[in-house]
Structure formats: structure tokens, C-alpha cells
Image (spheres, rainbow, N blue to C red):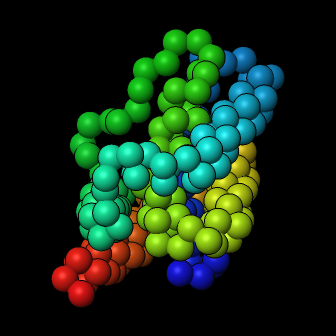
Amino acid sequence: MTLTSAVVLLFLVIDPFGNIPFFVAALNQVEPARHRFVVIRELMIALAVMVGFLFLGQQMLRALGISDPALTIAGGVILFLIAVRMMFPPTTSLQEDIEGEPFIVPLAIPYVAGPSVLAAELLLMSKEPERWSTWLIAVLIAWLATAVIVLLGSQFVARLGKRGLIAIERLMGMVLVAISIQMFLTGVEDFFG
């Protein structure tokens, strides 16, 4: 996997356009003057979690005795389920009711540093751990792109509208379906090969 494909994978899995409505709703109870501070704080916490998991996730896998093919297949299945949810969102809202100012949950975790991102990081590191610097750069670039989109969320909502955001999320979901199927097939091939 190249740096570019790793960035695209992580960006798609983070799904910043799909997270904009969640961020906007979570900040309803927060004074407008603190919105930017809260978003930046939550993004920094998410980055710390993502970088930490990038380096510590491998040790957890070894402790659990999970093989690379099993991880690749599981990652493909997880990404597929996320992609299906992006393309066909549930009829009930997945938004959490938050009283007061959000802290760590749900903005940092799971909206930005969710299970799907952590699984994607595990997959990257399990395949080629010696390329840790490439994967770290990929995480940083995907996080930075997400940060820009989330920080400008209200402007995206104003310009694209709800339908525009939904269209972008569905398109991202279609690309993620193809990536997840390829991961699944690679895991099966590694297992039987």
C-alpha cells in the first residue's frame, strides 16, 4: 500500500463529511465563543489516540494471538459494514445526546478516532511494521484533512447543504466498499496461500 492509498483509506474511514452534522449537534449546548477551542481540543485528543494506537496496537494483537490474515479479513468486514452504513444510513439517528461541553466522548472518540480507524491502523502496521514512518505520515495527513473539514463544518453545511453532504458521504462509501472487498480477498488469499 502506498502513502496515498493509506491516506485515502484513513480519510474515508474517518468520514469527516459524515461527522459534520454530529459535531454541529454536539456543540449546540456550548457557547459559540468556545466552539473552535472545543473542536481543536477534541481533534488533538483524537490524534493522540490514533498515533498511540498506531504504535501500541501491534502489541495488543500479539498478546491476543491474532494472525495477519484474520486481521485483514476482519478489517475488510468492518470496513464493509461501515461503507454500507455510509451508503444506506440507518433511519434512526446515531447521534448521542450531550449535556454541556463534550469532552473526549463522542467527538474525539468515536467520531474521529473510532473503531474503524483503529482497525485500519492495525492493518497497516501488521502488514508492514517497518514502514511505521509512512503510516504515521498517513495518519497525520488524514487527520489534518479531517481537522480542516470539521473546523469549516458550518461553512460546508452552508455551501453544500444537507443533500450535498449526503452525496459526498455516499460516494465515499462506494469507494470504501471496493477497498473493503479487496482487503477481505487479500486476507483470504493470505490464509489459503
Residue 22, placed above or below residue 72? above
Q: In the image, residue 142 lies at what x, y percent?
A: 64, 61
Asked where in the image residue 36 lies, by quadrant, the reply is: top right
Q: Is residue 150 visible?
A: no
Q: Residue furthest top?
A: 100
Residue 134, placed above or below residue 83? below
Residue visible at 53% across and 81% down in the picture: 1
Residue 34 horizontal side relative to residue 120, left or right: right
Of residues 188 and 8, the one drawn nearer to the viewer in this rendering: 188
Asked where in the image residue 84 lies, by quadrant, the reply is: bottom left
Q: Is residue 11 visible?
A: yes
Of residues 176 and 90, the one drawn nearer to the viewer in this rendering: 176
Of residues 15 and 128, the one drawn nearer to the viewer in this rendering: 128
Q: In the image, residue 25 lies at what x, y percent?
A: 53, 30
Q: Residue furthest bottom?
A: 193
Residue 126 horizontal side relative to residue 72, left or right: right
Q: In the image, residue 41 lies at what x, y percent?
A: 73, 31
Residue visible at 50% across and 30% down in the picture: 106
Question: Number of callouts in the render?
Answer: 0
Q: In the image, residue 64 lies at what x, y percent?
A: 33, 46
Q: Residue furthest left?
A: 192
Query: Where the C terminus falls, by quadrant?
Result: bottom left
Of residues 12 and 54, the one drawn nearer to the viewer in this rendering: 54
Residue visible at 66% across and 54% down in the picture: 143
